[in-house]
Image (cartoon, helix red, strand yellow):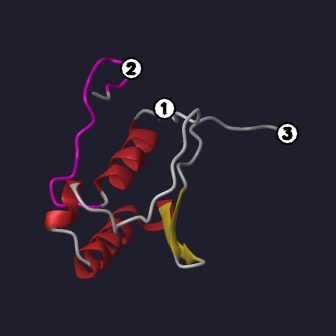
Amino acid sequence: MVRDEKGGVPKWDELLKCKCDIDATLQELMDNRLVWNEARFCFVQERDKNLGGNSLFRSEERIATEKRYLKRKWKAHIRLETYKSQDRVAMDAPRRQSVKL
């Protein structure tokens, strides 16, 4: 279970089935400025091609629709790109405090 600093659970967008983690991460960055990144472990996968999980309703059309939805919802805060046939997601959550260099 993932909880925020106050013990609350992030709200998930009910319209998303395949890309809900991207949306929830960006929502947490924008609201609470906190996302835990566990970098001790790594695995290689063929994204959106594995069996199990949401494979029962996942399709190329569904994934494309959800990507368009995310782009409309988050506008300049998200970039969805393809590099060497792999999807990339870049998120931009602006700073709340000023930075003086």
Mark 1 crowd level (few <14, some 14–19, many ≥20, 10 Å Cα) = few
Q: Which residue is mark 1?
A: 36
Q: Are marks 2 and 3 in contact (CB under 8 Å)?
A: no
Residue at the extreme bottom: 61
Dot 3 alpha-carbon crowd within 10 angstroms: few under 14, some 14 to 19, many 20 or more: few
Q: Amino acid at mark 2?
A: Glu
At 58% across and 36% down in the image, what residue appears?
A: 39
State how far apart marks 2 and 3 are (Cα). 30 Å
Tell us which disc is closer to us: 2 or 3.
2
Query: Residue 67 occupies which quadrant of the picture?
Result: bottom left
Disc 1 to disc 2, C-alpha distance: 11 Å
Question: Could you say which disc has been placed on residue 5 in the image?
Answer: 2
Q: Which residue is mark 3?
A: 101
Check disc 3 and give the amino acid type: Leu
Quadrant in which the C terminus appears: top right
Q: Secondary structure at mark 2?
A: loop
Q: Which of pointers 1 and 2 lies earlier in the amino acid sequence? A: 2
The structure residue drawn at horizontal position 14% and vertical position 65%, both measured from the top left corner, is 56
Asked whether the residues under the numbered discs 1 and 2 touch, taking CB atoms below 8 Å apart as contact, a structural biologist would say no
Q: Is residue 100 left or right of residue 12?
A: right
- The stretch in magenta equals 3-18
Give the vertical position of 88 relative to 27 (above or below). below
